[in-house]
Image: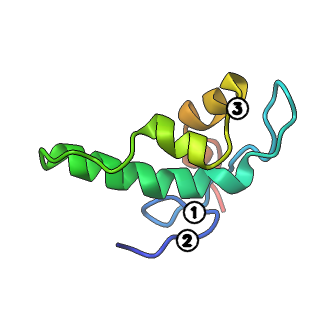
Amino acid sequence: MAPVRKGRNHIGDIVIIPVRCFTCGKIIGDVYEQYNVRKKIYDETVKAGEKPKETPKEILDDLGVSRYCCRRMILTHVDLIGEAAHFE
């Protein structure tokens, strides 16, 4: 498995992750990278036609993301920093 670069996406670009849930204010920024790593393993397992060890629901439950507003923040986050910042 490739090393995870904190604050960067899979190709090394810097991403801006919401630190808190916009609705309830719970801190979710620390969970985002762990979720992505485990979700990638899930996707690779499903693509190979095997039964995954855990589903995305189980991943979020294990990470302590129980409120649906917080789950929405993690599941629907799109990395748009490349679109917003063309110049360095």
Say which residue label 1 marks.
8
| Secondary structure category for the residue under label 3 | helix
Say which residue label 2 marks.
5
Q: Considering depth in this image, is 71 or 22 the residue closer to the camera?
A: 71
Q: CA distance from mark 3 to mark 1?
A: 21 Å
Q: Height in image: 25 above or below 48?
A: above
Whether pointer 2 and pointer 1 mark residues with C-beta atoms closer than 8 Å, the reply is: yes
Q: Height in image: 13 above or below 52?
A: below
Q: How is the image coloured?
A: rainbow
- Amino acid type assigned to the residue bearing label 3 in the image: Cys
Residue 26 lies, in percent from the top left, at 83, 39
Using the image, tell me which numbered label, if any, was put on residue 70: 3
- Dot in front, 3 or 1: 3
Residue 27 lies, in percent from the top left, at 81, 46
Q: Quadrant of residue 6?
A: bottom right
- Amino acid type assigned to the residue bearing label 1 in the image: Arg
